[in-house]
Image: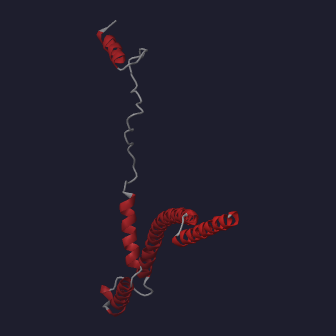
Amino acid sequence: MGPEERESRERTRANGASAVRRGSAERPRIRLDQPRTPRRTFLPEYDPEAFGRLSERIARFLGTGRFLVWMTVTVMAWITWNVAAPAPWRFDRYPFIFLTLALSLQASYAAPLILLAQNRQADRDRITQEQDRKQNERSIADTEYLTREVAALRMGLGEVATRDWIRSELQDVVRDLEQWQAVPAESDEHDR
């Protein structure tokens, strides 16, 4: 047994492996407690949140009067330049194909950006609605609890002696005592 083989066996024993790996080329051990190293890709990587925020900013700008004014001014300047400028300085002659291409390109980017912004807004609205629904459920549960407590208090108050009830009971007792006192006095007179 050579020194390389001894080192390999010692390494496997130190790692807790019970069996010795055979062959000169060892495969790296897959560890489940550590994340995999990311693979290289040829696609560009981007932060979806940053891209979403940018698309929302663009969509908000596209929906303003400022954008419409700037777009109108740009189109009017484009057309004026290409109609009134000297022939060598014109870069997009009538029927303004380059302008049509530029507007089509702007529209083809604007539509998906607006849809992306709407999807993000719909997600936020859905989360807000879910939170509102949970809050409403808690409010309903609290209201039902308080209703039960008020009903229990009413029932409990029905069993509590009020001032008027005590007064009427005392009056009844006084009447009974007066009657009782009157009855023995009459019986004493009959006995004599």
Left or right: 97, with 87 as reference point: right
- Which residue is painted at 43% across and 79% down in the image? 103
Nearest the camera: 16 or 184?
A: 184
Residue at the spot 42% in from the left edge and 80% down from the top edge: 63
Residue 92 seen: no
86 up-or-down from 13: above or below: below
Residue 60 x %, y %: 39, 76
Quadrant that contains the N terminus = top left
| Picture coordinates of residue 56, whole percent (x, y) | 40, 70
Out of 94 and 164, give the one closest to the viewer.
Answer: 164
Residue 4 visible: yes
Q: Residue 161 is drawn in which quadrant?
A: bottom right
Which quadrant of the rendered structure holds the C terminus? bottom right
Name the residue rendered at 53%, 69% in the picture: 162
Q: Residue furthest bottom?
A: 84
Where does residue 133 sit, x and y in percent of width and height? 52, 65
Disc tally is 0
Question: Looking at the rendering, which quadrant does residue 172 occupy?
Answer: bottom right
Rendered image quadrant of residue 180: bottom right
Nearer to us in this view, 93 or 124: 124
Q: List the single residue furthest toward the right.
A: 190
Q: x, y percentage for residue 144?
A: 56, 64
